[in-house]
Image (cartoon, rainbow, N blue to C red):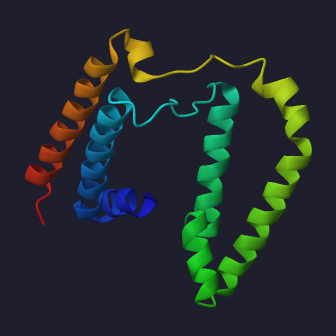
């Protein structure tokens, strides 16, 4: 997914970004249908948002830049023999292990005190599930057509 945004911002190539937009629209439609006919019983697990979310996102972004990509990209580059990706993989494993060790402390001093609760589109703007769906898919469609018209390559 990161490469889709990279290609758009650096090279103005939109094919991967448009594919992600279509995938979001299709999966959102499928989820709405399946949940309403009872094939999906439990709503997906959505965690609370807080300062920890912002800090985690910033650290994740910095890590992706330093590693040269996401975790899956690092793994396939390790398989291809890239030594820098091997160093990144070791760093990811050390980071995961370190986080696991300090999680309970972070939960008590950072996660719980700054939690704003669960945020969803329908909860934030105060509309029904179906209205939130149409707003989201409509925004995706508008974005897709803007990309297709302005950056047709």
Quadrant of the image containing the N terminus: bottom left
**Residue depicted at 85% across the width and 33% down the height:** 106
Above or below, 44 against 68 in this view is above
Residue 139 image offset from top left, x and y in percent:
23, 33
Question: Can you see residue 13?
Answer: no
Residue 151 image offset from top left, x and y in percent:
14, 56
**Residue depicted at 24% across the width and 25% down the height:** 135
Quadrant position of residue 105: top right
Above or below, 73 against 100 in this view is below
Residue 71 image offset from top left, x and y in percent:
61, 65
Relative placement, left or right, of 78 versus 114 is left
Q: Nearer the viewer, residue 39 or 7?
A: 39
Question: Can you see residue 20?
Answer: yes
Relative placement, left or right, of 93 versus 3 is right
**Residue depicted at 83% across the width and 48% down the height:** 99
Relative placement, left or right, of 46 versus 131 is right
Quadrant position of residue 153: bottom left
Q: Residue furthest top?
A: 126
Q: Nearer the viewer, residue 148 or 38?
A: 38
Q: Residue furthest bottom?
A: 81
Residue 149 image offset from top left, x and y in percent:
8, 51
Above or below, 152 against 41 in this view is below
**Residue depicted at 87% across the width and 53% down the height:** 98
Q: Nearer the viewer, residue 104 or 36?
A: 36
Q: Total marks drawn?
A: 0
Q: Residue furthest left?
A: 149
């Amino acid at each position: 997914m990161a490469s889709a945004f990279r290609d758009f911002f650096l090279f103005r190539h939109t094919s991967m970004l448009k594919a992600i937009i279509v995938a979001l629209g299709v999966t959102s439609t499928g989820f709405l249908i399946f949940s309403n006919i009872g094939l999906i019983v439990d709503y997906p697990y959505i965690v609370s948002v807080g300062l920890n979310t912002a800090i985690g996102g910033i650290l994740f972004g910095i890590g992706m830049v330093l590693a040269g990509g996401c975790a899956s990209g690092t793994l396939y580059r390790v398989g291809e023999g890239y030594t820098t990706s091997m160093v990144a993989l070791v760093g990811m494993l050390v980071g995961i292990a370190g986080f696991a060790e300090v999680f309970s402390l972070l939960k008590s001093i950072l996660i719980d005190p700054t939690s704003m609760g669960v945020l969803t589109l329908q909860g934030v703007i105060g509309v029904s599930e179906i209205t939130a769906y149409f707003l989201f898919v409509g925004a995706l469609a508008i974005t897709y057509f803007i990309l297709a018209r302005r950056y047709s390559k």
